Image (cartoon, coloured by chain):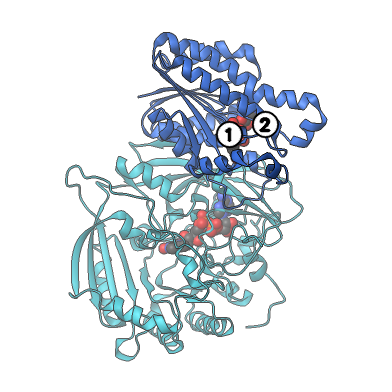
Chain colours: A cyan, B blue
Amino acid sequence: MTAPSHPSWGRYPASQPARVQRPGARPSALPASDTPVLAYGNGRSYGDSCLNNDGMLLDMGSLDRFIAFDPATGVIECEAGVLLADILELVVPQGWFLPVTPGTQFVSVGGAIANDVHGKNHHVAGTFGCHVRELELLRSNGQTVVCTPEQNADLFAATVGGLGLTGLLTRATIALKRIEGPYMDVDTLRFANLDEFFDISAASDRDYEYTVAWVDCSARGTNLGRGWFMRANHKPALGQQPDPRKRGGPTFPFVTPVSMINPVTLRPLNTLYFRRKFKARSRDTQHYQPYFYPLDGIKHWNRAYGPNGFLQYQCVVPHADARTAVAELLERIAAAGAGSFLSVLKVFGDVQSPGLMSFPRPGVTLALDFPNRGRETFELLDALDDIVRAAGGAVYPAKDARMSAAAFREYFPNLERFQGFVDPAFSSNFWRRVTSTTTSPS
Amino acid sequence: MRKILIVGATSTIAEQTARRFAANGDALFLTGRNEARLTAIADDLKVRGASTVATQVMDADDLKAHAPMIDAAEAALGGLDTVLIAYGTLPDQDSCTADPAAAVAAWHTNAVSVIALLTDIGNRFERQGHGTIAAISSVAGDRGRASNYVYGSAKAGLNAFLDGLRHRLFKAGVQVVTIRPGMVDTPMTADFDKGPLFASPEKVGADIHKAIEKGTAVCYTPGFWRLIMTVITSLPRAIFHRTGL
Ligand SMILES: Cc1cc2nc3c(=O)[nH]c(=O)nc-3n(C[C@H](O)[C@H](O)[C@H](O)COP(=O)(O)OP(=O)(O)OC[C@H]3O[C@@H](n4cnc5c(N)ncnc54)[C@H](O)[C@@H]3O)c2cc1C
Ligand SMILES: NC(=O)c1ccc[n+]([C@@H]2O[C@H](COP(=O)([O-])OP(=O)(O)OC[C@H]3O[C@@H](n4cnc5c(N)ncnc54)[C@H](OP(=O)(O)O)[C@@H]3O)[C@@H](O)[C@H]2O)c1
């Protein structure tokens, strides 16, 4: 048996497209297809939003050409399959950086737009879509539509965060941000519990461009929510510096027979991480690669979760109830002893997301992995959804493989307006799931 | 800085190779059949750092178009010092078996037209007394096999031609690089099931770039194909004929 082609990052659920096409050149029309069509960027979505079982996948990896770059203004235009890693490789030596970057550089520009991705600078820069100047969309009615925040603005707003359902993105123009060099000033602080996290976060967001925390999700009681807070700024230039960037690095060689992340390994891993630093605070200079992309150091680390794959859960809860809701979520996860060894906690800022369906909104976001242990995992995630729904929050589709249609409707109040922009030729596993009318009530 | 002519510049492998040249600030003249694709590739290579990129549409099967195209390339870049012949077709062996014209057409593109081009370019480089000539052949040229011997024999003809050209131009200080890729994941092999032997065009492009920089005479890419082909070429006929290769 050959491995299924084009999996999602969580390797769950299994899915097999009926056909895969790789456009060699920027297409001027969509290929004919009697099954639903979906673009596949680089498969870094965890769940099923990049999957199209029995449908046609358009693999965008071959549309990876730059179109124009002006080193004076930092405006870059490229095809939708260009990876953020390719952009960095080109622009960092010329003093530019991505305006927003997720925790892996191996995502495509099309994927970054379709999920309106966010990074550690959300509190100052908003989402990736805030920096998209223009995009080109192929629709199944034969039209090629150029959208900007001003021109075809409604289709622009539907496409940013539009889960690849409004048509095929072929190219985009993005405004980069200036940097003086490839290094970061990183300040790491240990916090003992959730209250301390909120205090440090409030005190850091003004002076630090990037803030994020790693939380020990096995800790309970008075230790609940303990972890490390990392805040950073781009380092001012120190004259000429070598760029030690390397794309290689070890590859996780195979899918392990059982998940390496399990209740037995979880606690010691977490505790080890929490205690890894002797000092409660440290400052250092880091190259942007390990700072932004610690997980990219080992290619295909997702294989360590074994053959059943894993689920990632990322939610946001509004500020009002954030402390109680996050505490409840962490307590629930710790009680189940089920989380991955690190979870990520960050306070989103108030910059309005440009997409109708964008996930980021003001509040606190929590993200973590769960090895897929079948029913107990799904029940736990449903329980987390109950907490998030009660708090008026949302779950991130880019990382989801299981939320119910009812939950989805609650999380995305613009859904009905969005549906008016969905291209009828496009669909995904995710979309079929969350728009299904036959799911059990929840 | 190199001044490079790429014939068949819309080939996926050629494009990956060209990106390496561009990153070094080299100057490039690209020819191919599809104008829109050539323009898209040229724009990309400019962004990636190429000092000059010019394009011209040419069907390599049209032998009369060769000399004017080479003249244009020399004029555009102020001379040439590197040539990469990258185009090729992988004909359907069954059609070639059924139809002599199909077999001849495959030879025309993969061997005859390349020999025509390199005869002209070889003479120019011999006169100028330096340069590197590289052509993408294939491991398929190492031994004729039932599954693709028309393609393979054209590449074998090309291999012998390149060997002779290298021998002749050695004295002139001109290097000739024969590139023999194994199976590469490109549109040419779109209908194949991709097993573990398939290499990425990035890897092959990087190997080709290195071989051209070093002037390697015969470059297998990825390198393990040298071993595989040694085994295949040394299989006794009695065994070879029983295989499905
Ligand atoms: C280690 C890791 C860390 C991550 N960290 C973050 C983070 O910090 N913040 C964050 O927001 N996300 C994060 N993510 C998620 C990731 O950024 C998103 O899932 C992203 O959308 C993946 O992009 P991709 O190119 O791989 O697209 P895919 O996953 O292949 O596709 C994602 C969606 O984009 C659509 N799409 C892709 N290309 C096109 C196109 N050309 N036209 C139309 N639609 C298209 C697809 O149809 C699909 O709906 C992380 C993922 C990983 C693996
Ligand atoms: N892929 C493999 O597994 C493999 C293995 C060994 C060797 N090779 C060799 O590698 C080379 C590059 O192939 P590839 O894998 O990069 O495939 P590719 O992307 O399909 O490129 C083949 C290119 O050849 C061009 N071409 C064909 N006939 C032409 C003609 N008459 N005039 C001008 N251009 C012509 C095509 O142009 P159009 O786009 O206009 O059709 C296309 O750009 C070929 O010589 C091939 O034989 C490939």
Answer with the quarter of the image where residue A378 lies: bottom right
Q: Earlier in the sequence, mark 1 or mark 2?
A: 1
Q: Is residue A67 visible?
A: no
Answer with the quarter of the image where residue B234 lies: top right
Q: Residue furthest bottom?
A: A221
Q: Is residue A39 left or right of residue B50?
A: right
User: Is the residue at mark 1 from the same chain as the one at mark 2?
Assistant: yes
Choose between B150 and B236: the one closer to the eye: B236
Choose between B42 and A135: the one closer to the eye: B42
Residue at the disc numbered 2: B151
Three-letter residue code for mark 2: Tyr
Q: Is mark 1 within 8 Å of ligand 2?
A: yes
Q: Secondary structure at mark 1?
A: loop
Which quarter of the image is occupied by the N terminus of chain B? Answer: top left
Q: Are marks 1 and 2 in contact (CB under 8 Å)?
A: yes
Q: CA distance from mark 1 to mark 2?
A: 9 Å
Residue for point 43% across, 89% down? A335
Choose between A153 and B205: the one closer to the eye: B205
Residue for point 19% across, 42% down? A240
Three-letter residue code for mark 1: Ser
Residue B62 is situated, as x and y percent measured from the top left of the image, at 65, 16
Residue A107 is situated, as x and y percent measured from the top left of the image, at 47, 54
Label 2: chain? B
Disc marking residue B138: 1
Q: Is residue B114 visible?
A: yes
Residue B112 drawn above or below residue B201: above
Q: Secondary structure at mark 2?
A: helix
Q: Is mark 2 within 8 Å of ligand 2?
A: yes
Residue A152 is situated, as x and y percent measured from the top left of the image, at 57, 47
Which quarter of the image is occupied by the C terminus of chain B? Answer: top right
Label 1: chain? B
Q: Residue furthest right?
A: B98
